[in-house]
């Protein structure tokens, strides 16, 4: 077994709640609550219902719950279905594997029926934190978000499966060797391509669910004694890093600062229902309009100067599907300018097809700035009909760890999303439970709060 694999496996197997800083626990609870809100909102969407119908009839024991419904299925299918719902509306968190919440939390909750003893809130938080940590570390070992995703891999799926597996291993209290086997098995379940970006197809929504499912299955198989490749992260033919990140891999990142630098601390909670790549520009146009008392009718042109990677990822104006619109930077700007926000309602079908929206889209131009790095945020220029021009670059968009949503805004987002599926009373109880999670003694109580009876 390689040193890196041994170190990761030992870390997952031996880390306990008492090892987590208080601030990290508080942050974890925010992300847990936020992910529940995003998932509940997506749980009754047409795509989520379609995949539910595909697998719901599978016989299983034990059973796990599909959030926002009264249905049950196998743990691994529950992880998949809840993961699909979590990523449905682009409202789940980002900055981990990339979308860690939509991968890790569905896997952890789905694995609760597999546990031999009662799971405390502390154990649940610990598993979630470890899932975020390992998923991000694998992405950084691939060279980071930009090179891995520029190569065509969707890191939520390719790297997220490791995070899901680590989280479930922690929850099931697997030992170091079992955890190492699970991470090796997870490598074989890794996959997910950015091909959806070209036609707005819906496969992106499935990636988080597949990573969650793969993590659950990897841990279950390792618990039963199945082995995974011992040289997953070594420089060998068929190794994960050599295969998926042949030119950008940085294997030392797997264990750099392990147990000292917690990767959940770098994750963002999204205020807008769109790809994270659009958020800085949304903030910029909103600030420009507010600072100069400008309304949509005053706008002659919006010019965006951006890096080639962001142009390829979010430069489309295909609005035929919700998935396509949520990946469109021009649409995000047009929506913010016209509707005053870029929340979920701004992406409704009638908004996407409105004549006013089409007019505003025609006023938006994207220009490549070859001097910008892949991680640089775009510069937004607003020109009015009277000829005034203003520029703004928001380097730390709202929702980032350095510019977080306020507690009030976080709870408002959660309640608005969860209310789409659950009663007001149930939403209130779920919120209170999550915010006091470290004091809870039986996590199955949480599952009961996610069921829509």
Image: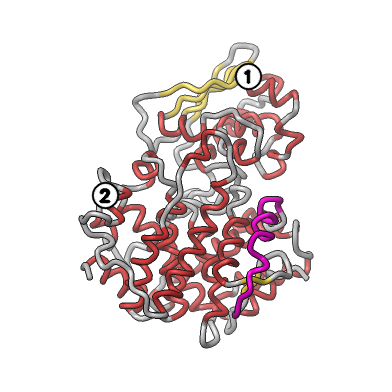
Return the residue nearer the eye: 192 or 448.
192
Return the residue nearer the eye: 73 or 305.
73
- Specify which label sits upstream in the sequence, 1 or 2: 2
Return the residue nearer the eye: 225 or 145.
225
Instruction: Answer whether residue 91 is magenta in the image.
Output: no
Tell me what residue is drawn at x 56 percent, y 52 percent. Answer: 206
Residue 44: assigned label: none
Which stretch appears magenta? 45-61
| 251 to the left or right of 96 | left
The N terminus - image quarter:
bottom left
Q: CA distance from mark 1 to mark 2?
A: 41 Å
Question: How many residues crowd around disc 2 within 10 Å: few (fewer than 14), some, or many (20 or more)?
Answer: many
Q: Is residue 299 above or below residue 104?
A: above
Whether residue 118 is visible = yes
Q: Position of residue 98 (x, y in %)?
A: 45, 51
Residue under pointer 2? 249
Secondary structure under the numbered disc 1 in the rendered image: helix
**Residue 419 is drawn in which quadrant?**
bottom right
Residue 362: assigned label: 1
Q: Are marks 1 and 2 in contact (CB under 8 Å)?
A: no
Instruction: Answer whether residue 54 is magenta in the image.
Output: yes
Tell me what residue is drawn at x 54 percent, y 61 percent. Answer: 31
Whether residue 390 is visible = no
The C terminus - image quarter:
bottom right
Secondary structure under the numbered disc 2 in the rendered image: loop
Q: Position of residue 83 (x, y in %)?
A: 57, 59
Mark whose residue sits in front, 1 or 2: 2
Tell me what residue is drawn at x 56 percent, y 38 percent. Answer: 327
């Amino acid at each position: 077994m390689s040193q890196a694999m041994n170190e990761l496996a030992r870390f997952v197997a031996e880390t306990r709640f008492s090892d987590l800083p208080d601030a990290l626990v508080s942050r974890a609870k925010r992300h847990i609550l936020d992910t529940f809100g995003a998932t509940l909102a997506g749980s009754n969407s047409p795509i989520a219902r379609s995949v539910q119908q595909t697998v719901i009839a599978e016989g299983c024991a034990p059973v796990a719950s599909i959030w926002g419904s009264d249905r049950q299925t196998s743990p691994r299918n529950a992880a998949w279905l809840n993961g699909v719902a979590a990523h449905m509306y682009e409202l789940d968190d980002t900055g981990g594997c990339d979308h860690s919440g939509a991968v890790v939390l569905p896997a952890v909750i789905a694995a609760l029926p597999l546990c031999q003893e009662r799971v405390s809130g502390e154990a649940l938080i610990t598993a979630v934190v470890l899932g975020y940590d390992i998923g991000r570390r694998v992405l950084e070992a691939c060279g980071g978000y930009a090179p891995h995703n520029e190569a065509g891999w969707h890191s939520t799926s390719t790297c997220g499966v490791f995070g899901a597996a680590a989280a479930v291993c922690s929850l099931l209290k697997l030992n170091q060797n079992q955890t190492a086997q699970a991470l090796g098995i997870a490598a074989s379940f890794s996959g997910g391509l950015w091909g959806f970006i070209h036609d707005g197809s819906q496969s992106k929504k499935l990636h988080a669910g597949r990573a969650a499912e793969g993590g659950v299955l990897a841990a279950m198989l390792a618990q039963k004694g199945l082995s995974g490749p011992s040289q997953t992260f070594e420089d060998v033919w068929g190794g994960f890093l050599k295969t998926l990140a042949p030119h950008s891999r940085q294997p030392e990142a797997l264990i750099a600062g392990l147990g000292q630098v917690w990767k959940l601390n770098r994750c963002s909670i999204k205020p807008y229902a769109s790809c994270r790549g659009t958020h800085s520009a949304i903030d910029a146009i909103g600030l420009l309009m507010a600072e100069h008392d400008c309304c949509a009718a005053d706008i002659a042109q919006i010019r965006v100067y951006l890096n080639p990677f962001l142009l390829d990822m979010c430069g489309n104006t295909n609005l035929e599907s919700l998935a396509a619109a949520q990946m469109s930077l021009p649409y995000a700007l047009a929506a913010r300018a016209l509707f005053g926000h870029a929340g979920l309602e701004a992406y409704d079908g009638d908004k996407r097809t409105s004549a006013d929206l089409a007019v505003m889209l025609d006023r938006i131009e994207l220009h490549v700035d070859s001097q910008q790095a892949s991680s640089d945020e775009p510069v937004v220029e607003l020109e009015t009909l009277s000829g005034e021009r203003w520029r703004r670059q928001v380097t730390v968009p709202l929702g980032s760890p350095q510019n977080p949503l306020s507690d009030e805004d976080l709870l408002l987002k959660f309640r608005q999303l969860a209310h789409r599926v659950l009663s007001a009373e149930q939403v209130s109880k779920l919120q209170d439970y999550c915010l006091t999670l470290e004091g809870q003694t039986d996590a199955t109580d949480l599952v009961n709060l996610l069921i829509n009876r």
